[in-house]
Amino acid sequence: MKARLTDLLICLKCSGPLRCLAESEDTTLPWFEVLEGQLICELCGRNYPITRGVPRLILGPLPDEVEKTVTGFGYEWQTFDGHIQETYMTDKTNFLDFIAPVTPDFFADKMVLDAGCGLGRFLKLGADFGSRDIIGVDLSGAVDVAYRHVRHLPNAHVIQADIMALPLKAVFDYIFSVGVLQFLEQPQAGFDRLTGLLRDEGSISVWVYAKENNGWVIRFVSPVRQYITSRLPRPLLFGLSYCLGLPLYLLIKLLYKPANEGKFPFNLARILPYNDYFYYSSRLRYIGLVSTIFDHLVPSLVTYLSKEELAAWFHQKKFTHVTITSRNNMSWRAHGIYSSTLTPESV
Ligand SMILES: [Zn+2]
């Protein structure tokens, strides 16, 4: 943890300022990098540990369902990390596809928050795009992996915290949250927490699963996930995802990819189910596909959102220039600018 990050943090109990007490530091970096220590609240005295370079700002135990989802994703990121580096999953075109219409130059000199950073693949890209400072937050143990990936970058930070209780000052010009809010118990409350950290004229991007075009997933996959797969031991679920990946991989490579690239004498792509999504998936390596399957089977909580519901989130929170576009015909990416001078009625 860069010691100067302390200035952006607040106490979860009383919102008081924190003081950093370093017990060991990394002297190989040109700034004060705290590896072990504590953050102590100047007002109430509560302290929060800094371990392995990451400040851990969490109050009390998490509810069971949240804990299961968080540890499931934490296992996934730590297991898949070595396999997805330098692939499409960590590529900037993939990141930009999640946050369109935002472009790399948009990041220049902005204070940015990556809400739900996982292993930090987009956090690193946001830092490379020139953010003044970018903070990645995640509740899972994946923060340790994220920290390894960005510790050498002067403008990137990682903290372990809950989106529902963020220990941060409202200083952000831009917040993005890719594939995270749908896994919260109350997705809209999570959105409201994030938007509360924006400066005036700051903006937010979110990417969430769509209710539209996902009818059979909601009807058939969700119960299997809720009652069976989310309860399986993680290594077993990994093995299951690996096996399920094979027929799907063959289907994508032998049918969806050639159909979309004009290799058949007629337009087969037009009638293939979930064509946009599976054609997109043809860019993933086998392990990327396995990771995607694991993603769908591990959380016990998932909310699918309609475009209307998502629009209402922005409408209720004084946002302007809101764009909501479909991604692969099965999810929504939304972006809007916060303006304190607007009344909700005028948006
Ligand atoms: Zn305090």
Image (cartoon, grey):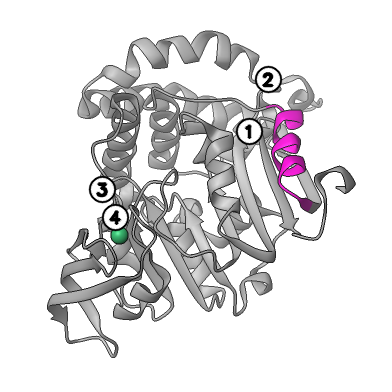
Marks 1/3: CA–CA distance: 29 Å
- The answer to whether 268 is drawn above or below residue 171 in the figure is above
Q: What span is in magenta?
A: 306-319
- State the image quarter where residue 310 is shown: top right
Residue placed at 40% from the left, 24% from the top?
297
Q: Does the CB distance between marks 1 and 3 fall below 8 Å?
A: no
- Mark 3 or 2, nearer chain start: 3
Per the rendering, the mark at residue 141 is 3
Please, what is the three-letter code of the amino acid marked with disc 1?
A: Tyr
Marks 1/2: CA–CA distance: 9 Å
Question: Which of labels 1 and 4 is toward the front?
Answer: 4
- Mark 4 or 2, nearer chain start: 4
**Depth check, front residue: 45 or 164:** 45
- Mark 1 or 3, nearer chain start: 3
Residue placed at 59% from the left, 35% from the top?
188
Relative image position of residue 4 (x, y in whole percent):
35, 80
Relative image position of residue 12 (x, y in whole percent):
35, 54
Residue 308 in magenta stretch: yes
Main secondary structure of the magenta stretch: helix
Please, what is the three-letter code of the amino acid marked with disc 2?
A: Pro
Relative image position of residue 285 (x, y in whole percent):
45, 44
**Depth check, front residue: 40 or 265:** 40
Residue identifier under label 4: 57
Residue identifier under label 2: 273
Q: Residues within 10 Å of mark 2 (few under 14, many from 20)?
A: few
Please, what is the three-letter code of the amino acid marked with disc 3?
A: Gly
Per the rendering, the mark at residue 277 is 1
